[in-house]
Amino acid sequence: MEGVKAQLRRHRIETPSWAYGNSGTRFKVYAQAGVPRTPQEKIADAAKVHELTGVAPSIALHIPWDKVDDYPALARFASDHGIAIGAINPNVFQEDDYRLGSVCNPDPKIRRKATDHLLECIEVGVQTGSTILSLWFADGTNYPGQDSIRARQDRLADALSEVYGQLPDGMRMLVEYKLFEPSFYTMDLPDWGTSFAHCVNLGPKAQVLVDTGHHAPGTNIEFIVALLLRAGKLGGFHFNSRFYADDDLMVGAADPFQLFRIMHEIVAADALAPEADVAFMLDQCHNIEPKVPAMIRSVLNVQEATAKALLVDREALAKAQAEGDVLGANAALMDAYNTDVRPLLAELRAEDGLDPDPIGAYHRSGYQQKIEAERVGGSAMGWGA
Ligand code: PSV
Ligand code: MN
Ligand code: MN
């Protein structure tokens, strides 16, 4: 148990700035009381989540949603609040110019503009002390014949390679894929194989980012995770859960067993500790639920899945596997999954001077009342607006 606790203490989960702001679907963005109006207020909320959970010490930024004049000052603000700036996410999908794509656009001027924004985000990373440039492209086509699939891949490869060439030491590039949406015929990065192929060509500083909501229903995500880990190409996750498509619901809400299976692959490959360089990030939209407690819930859900994965009796599992004991091997996994780890996590928090019940502690803290009183006119994150 002490070994399990030691590993849990070293686990890091990053929360996204955009999940603290108002969000919604294409039908409606719901305004909530107390949501942040500035990047600083998003950082304060992320810091609250870290203060109560102890395992969420960084916040991902989305540029220009979190654009400021002075990035070093923003990083200092974060560190004064006990957290760091995590992945920098460029946004090349929210301007009219990008109607036919960003780095894959048939117009070279638009490709230049998009690539320049990616380069600008490297600079944001340098100024904020970030080590991750996290790329997602909405690029694709809606109709057969609309554009050349191969030419678009060439343009994508060119842009990625230019950006890769500018990555400073210590910074890596994560390439996210998504099956569909906003494009419906082709996405230029639709799946892990396409991301992987580009990353292999680019070099060791390019790795694949797995967003759990970006696959076809029924996809075995832990298989992808195992393959990428084996190739040293798993850069990180965007955790969230889905019932249908890219629902962006709280991680662990729809399928906690899948989350456990993913974390089991991570633990089995010894990839949980920060040195393994797998970034455990959340990417969610809290449309109808209050933001900060929803984020705390999500962090706890990842932590619970991780604790269960750490409880798998590896010796018993390896023995059963070697002996071809199908039921025994499956039982080794299920015993861990069916363990209630909440008492263990409560104990861990108490030992570390945290409240054993982070959500209860949030409600008792008065933070929600404070932000509702102080913050009037919170902004939409941009997505779905
Ligand atoms: C796209 O669906 C995505 O998962 C990408 O990570 C974006 O940066 C993020 O969502 C925006 O919400
Ligand atoms: Mn994502
Ligand atoms: Mn998504």
Image (cartoon, rainbow, N blue to C red):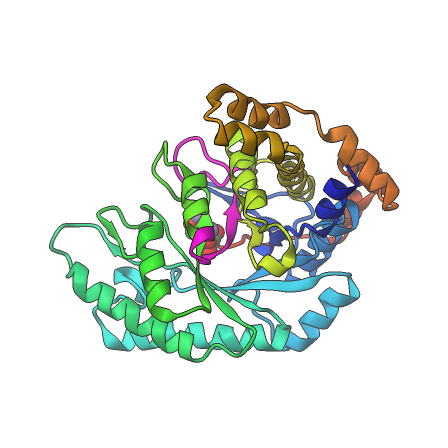
Q: Quadrant of the N terminus?
A: top right
Residue at horizontal 27%, vertical 77%?
A: 109
Location of residue 385 with respect to 118 vertically, above or below: above
Residue at horizontal 24%, vertical 76%?
A: 108
Would residue 37 be visible to someone looking at this image? no
| Residue 143 forms part of the magenta stretch | no
**Which residue is situated farthest in the top direction here?**
327
Q: Could you tell me residue 214's position as x and y percent?
A: 40, 44
Q: Could you tell me residue 54's position as x and y percent?
A: 76, 49
Occupied quadrant, residue 47: bottom right
Location of residue 91 with respect to 117 vertically, above or below: above
Occupied quadrant, residue 260: top right
| Residue 241 forms part of the magenta stretch | yes
Number of marks drawn: 0
Horizontally, residue 135 falls left or right of residue 380, namely: left
Q: Could you tell me residue 133's position as x and y percent?
A: 50, 67
Horizontally, residue 175 falls left or right of residue 377, namely: left
Residue at horizontal 47%, vertical 52%?
A: 229
Residue at horizontal 64%, vertical 32%?
A: 313
Prevalent SS, magenta region:
loop
* Along the viewing direction, whichever of 285 and 50 lies nearer the viewer: 50
**Which residue is situated farthest in the left direction here?**
145
* Along the viewing direction, whichever of 357 and 27 lies nearer the viewer: 357
Would residue 57 be visible to someone looking at this image? yes
Horizontally, residue 46 falls left or right of residue 114, namely: right
Location of residue 341 with respect to 75 vertically, above or below: above
Provide the residue span drawn in magenta: 229-250
Q: Could you tell me residue 121's position as x and y percent?
A: 50, 72
